[in-house]
Amino acid sequence: MLKISARRHLTSLTFVALCLLSSQSMAEEGIAAYYANKYHGRTTASGAIYDKNKLTAAHRTLKFGTQVKVTDLNNHKSVIVTINDRGPFIKKRIIDLSYAAAQKLDLLKAGLSKVRLEIIQ
């Protein structure tokens, strides 16, 4: 009986581990926006100073330092950003990009776009 219980426990742990690993590779789709210039030079939630010329972004739950590939689903351009802030705080938006990241995606004129996020590291 003890062997069966240990096997079940190990199976449960394996399942949890696989779920955690697979969640790291899952993608998320939604709307992206970018920071207004007025935030340049202000402190982010991570303690870093927001620099509009760096490839950074805000996400509600990803750990600070996580690298994310952001792909614009309209023009298929991509950029890799580092999460260093919390947000966005507007429903249906999944990421706020720095000015530089938005520029790489040709997002500046439209201001918003549907994107896909993939965790790189």
Image: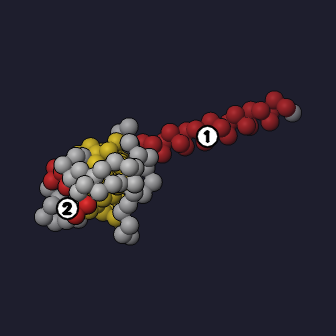
* Foreground disc of the pair 1, 2: 2
Mark 2, other Cα within 10 Å: few <14 / some 14–19 / many ≥20: few
The residue under the point 23% across, 50% down is: 51
The residue under the point 15% across, 61% down is: 108
Identity, as a three-letter code, of the amino acid under mark 1: Phe
Residue placed under numbered mark 2 in the picture: 37
* Left or right of 98 on screen, residue 3: right
Name which of mark 1 and mark 2 comes first in the sequence.
1
**Mark 1–mark 2 distance (CA, rounded to whole Å):** 45 Å
Mark 1, other Cα within 10 Å: few <14 / some 14–19 / many ≥20: few
| Mark sitting on residue 96 | none
List x then y, in percent, for residue 3. Answer: 81, 29
The residue under the point 45% across, 54% down is: 61
* Left or right of 105 on screen, residue 62: right
Q: Secondary structure at mark 1?
A: helix
> Which picture quadrant has residue 120?
top left
Identity, as a three-letter code, of the amino acid under mark 2: Asn
The quarter of the picture where the N terminus appears is top right
Residue extending farthest right: 1
Q: Secondary structure at mark 2?
A: helix
Tags 1 and 2 in contact by the CB under 8 Å rule?
A: no
* Left or right of 75 on screen, residue 6: right
* Left or right of 57 on screen, residue 18: right
Q: Nearer the viewer, residue 81 or 3?
A: 81
Looking at the image, how many numbered discs can be counted on the residues? Answer: 2
Q: Nearer the viewer, residue 105 or 37?
A: 37
List x then y, in percent, for residue 95. Answer: 33, 58
Q: Tell me if residue 57 can be seen.
A: yes
List x then y, in percent, for residue 81. Answer: 28, 45
Residue placed under numbered mark 1 in the picture: 15
The quarter of the picture where the C terminus appears is top left
The residue under the point 28% across, 52% down is: 50
